[in-house]
Image: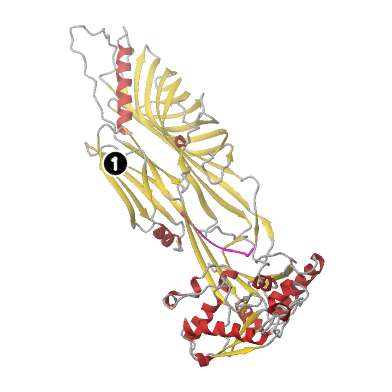
Amino acid sequence: MKKTILILTAILLIAGNSLLSQEEKSERNIRIGMFGAGALNMHSGQFSSYDGMLICGTFDDGTGIGWMAGNSIEVPFGTNFSFFGRAFFHKADGDFEAPPKDPPRVSLDDGTLVYLTTEHQLDVSLDYVQIEALGAYYVSDKVYLALGPGVAIPTHASYTQVEEIQQPFGLKFRNGESTRQIASANFDDNPNTETNLRITAHALIGADFLIAENLYLSPEAGYIFPFTNVLSNNDWSVSTLHAGLALKYELGTPEKVIIKEPSPALEPVTEPKFTPSPIASIKAKSLLENGAMLEFGQVTVSEENNNNYVPILPYIFFDAGKSELQNRYITLNSSEINNFDESTLQDSVLAVYHNMLNIVGSRMQKNTNANLTVTGCLEPADDGRNQNKLASSRAQRVKDYLVNIWGIPADRIITKSRELPEEISNRNVAEGREENRRVELSSNSSDILEPVRLITHNSEVSPKSIVMQANVKYDENLKSWDLVANYIDNTQLWNKSGNGSPSSSMQWDLDRNKMIELARKDVQGNHISLKLKVIDNEGNTDEANTAVPIFYEKKSKYYDGEIVKDSIVERYNLIFFDYDMPLINEENESTFKTILNRINTNSSVSITGFTDKLGTDEYNNQLSIDRAKSVEKAIKERVVPEIIFSKGVGETLIYDNDLPEGRFYNRTVIVEITTPLKR
């Protein structure tokens, strides 16, 4: 930047000398110097942050404090007139505020829904190198007025947008603060926007005070009026009030001189050559799995945790007149049982049930004190002759599998037989008779037939890669560059370097496990810092930085697929509602006790009743409501959670009702306990 200003100053010096080639000049000689000023930048108009941002905002007028500094030349004409040439750097920053559109509603700790009132704050950084040609009139020996045009060349235009919570008081964002950064970027990175050259008019008043031989100190004040907008597609302009000091040195002695045109025989003056220092910038974008590119860089880690307690239906169903196990039941050979683990079963109620013999076999291996009773039953209307033998054969088939495959001692498994089961399904329909053709399992240990707890844990990391777009101005003399990605604690995550100029686009493929590890850290302002450093052959350096924020969210899922964030959902299926009955039976006691132990004072409990497909819609709807109400009543007798509600959805078939086990599992009440995560 300094060398740029020196080049422009040299151009002004040459222009001033050419003007001096006129015939007669005043008593004042050429004055060269430097000046600095504080600036009040007044931004007017209306503009919006570009669409690549997470949350856009519309901003009106704003102000900002800046500064100006540069070099000047003064060439006198006659007694009272002078030409002022100036080249300087202008910091034209501004601050804007705007409320967001369509404020959302949020839930307070007591469950009240209120509107979230926030304020968007936009900090704009604008840098210009400005060249001016002013005509000045000395109203006295000291005081002068100047007016003239200028051209401002943009060298940097960027913004940072943050959002601050105004109401309700005390509410915090995920980062634990009432303020969060929305985005930061360069305006030129938006393909629909570019920064304009600023055409201005500058009015100036000042006075010269002699402080040493040929040295003047000049206080000045002025106003810069713009004719063009900052950006190509926004009605946004910047005017500036400024006040400061100029230090001027007068060449030669103050006397009247005659300057003639240089003789052609004289050797031409060689203009100084300057090599500008490199200016670096870096921008991060997000490359998604589907190939889409987001105009901002950020890492989002989303983790879904679900706890599903699946009850064991202790029945094995058989085809009419047969004792063979049906194909839908999963059977293993003796070489496969060592790899069986019930916690890794598919998160599906029927998939768990169809592995029931393996679950029981595995648990019997571990609990050597447990015994199992296997009772064969039949349906007289379907199973034909030799009914007692068929019922015993069905029980023996189950026992043989547990003994021969799982190695359970035969004396630990007792077989029995009977005609119809103790709890008989409706024999007037084919579905009810199918449910009566079964083997029933029971045990002296509750561990053998307790529910299966399935914990699913899924993590998603987005994006796939961070794409870094590097840009270096004045890179003709560039020697080398280095680009590094550091975590907030300065741990290096990625690095790339090279000679000459960097590539305009570099891709960093994220380490999924590492991003999950970083996102789980409870760190305020969690982010990754990208730093680009360049150096030229003369030792001049420049650095550019940008931040990639890291966001982390935990979520769970209800049985109907609805996602809930920052909470854990535990799901329990209460089954064994007897056919056409709304009451909880003894087989649910163990699961029900677990439910009571898992309810906290800040938990929300949702109870949903279901029925199978048998019966009329109206009757099933009332039966499902009665089942849900009976569970709600039983819970309230032991514990009262913060929120509890129940409903019945009638014949909403969540399992395959063409199968007898599907109908049993559909005679259910699903209890979902939602507990907020601690922060």
Residue 573, above or below 117: below
State the residue in front, 332 or 366. Answer: 332
Image coordinates of residue 256 in percent, x first then y, are: 29, 12
Position of 253 compared to 508: left or right? Answer: left
Q: What residue appears at the point 80 percent right and 67 percent down from the top-left corner?
A: 616
Residue 28 visible, this angle: no
- Among the 4 quarters of the image, the one containing residue 80: top left
The amino acid sitting under disc 1 is: Val
- Among the 4 quarters of the image, the one containing residue 146: top left
Image coordinates of residue 188 in percent, x first then y, are: 45, 34
SS at mark 1 in the image: strand
Position of 318 compared to 476: left or right? Answer: right
Looking at the rendering, in which quadrant would you find the N terminus? Answer: top left
First to last magenta residue range:
550-559
State the residue in front, 655 or 417. Answer: 417
Image coordinates of residue 400 in percent, x first then y, are: 52, 84
Reply yes or no: does residue 553 show up in magenta.
yes
- What residue is shown with label 1? 534
